[in-house]
Amino acid sequence: MLINKKYSLILLCMLVSSVLFAQSATADLTKRYLERANTQYENAEYDAAYKTINAVLRLNETTGMPANVTLMATQIYSKVLDNILSTGNYDEFTTITSNIESYPSIVDGTLRKKINEVYAKQIIELERQIDNQKLAGAFMAGGNNTESKKKIDKLIKEIDRCISLMEG
């Protein structure tokens, strides 16, 4: 009986030490990645900082988000959204909004405002594309407008999606 208690105690000590080691490793990894993200941010390497901070967010999603991670993520996401607003390149925007939904603690009023600005700009761009498609269709009045109509329908659906996300 005493031997079983001894083995149980040893097993329990090993388990506790492995849990503490894992937490320590996570904290150390978080610190290193956060330092890297900060350096990338300071060097205006926002795309690289975005990838690095996402690794930090994934690393801490089950243990709780430290305040310094939340602050850095908010700043980096803000710069990435600024870049999207200035370039009009919406390729990463869906991924960004998906990440923001996964990590709501990083969203503040400024970030929410920028997201809505991107949606609004995207809507304007899509409406312009629709107008261009309609104009192109008008010039091809005698021809087959099926492709043009499909593109217009697709653009309208994208506008509707953007509006619903802005409202939600």
Image: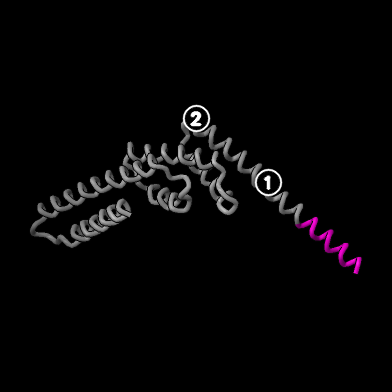
Q: Residue at x 33, y 39 (%)?
A: 85
55 relative position to 100: left or right? right
Label 2 sits on residue = 43
Above or below for 53 versus 138? above
Residue 15 x %, y %: 76, 57
Q: Residues within 10 Å of mark 2 (few under 14, many from 20)?
A: few
**In the current view of this chain or complex, which residue is farthest to the bottom?**
1
- Per the model, the C-alpha gap separating discs 2 and 1 is 27 Å
30 relative position to 72: left or right? right
- Helix, strand or loop at label 2? It is loop
Q: Nearer the viewer, residue 159 or 14?
A: 14
Q: Residues within 10 Å of mark 1 (few under 14, many from 20)?
A: few
Residue 126 x %, y %: 24, 49
Q: Give me the disc on residue 25.
A: 1
Queried whether the magenta region covers residue 4, the answer comes back as yes
Q: Amino acid at mark 2?
A: Asn
Q: Nearer the viewer, residue 36 or 72?
A: 72
Residue 118 x %, y %: 32, 44
Q: Quadrant of residue 107?
A: top left
Could you tell me which quadrant the C terminus lies in? bottom left
Q: Amino acid at mark 1?
A: Ala
Residue 138 x %, y %: 10, 53
**In the current view of this chain or complex, which residue is farthest to the left?**
142
Label tally? 2
Could you tell me which quadrant the N terminus lies in? bottom right
Q: Residue at x 64, y 44 (%)?
A: 27
Task: Read off the magenta span.
Answer: 1-15
Q: Residue at x 40, y 50 (%)?
A: 97
* Viewer-side label of 2, 1: 1
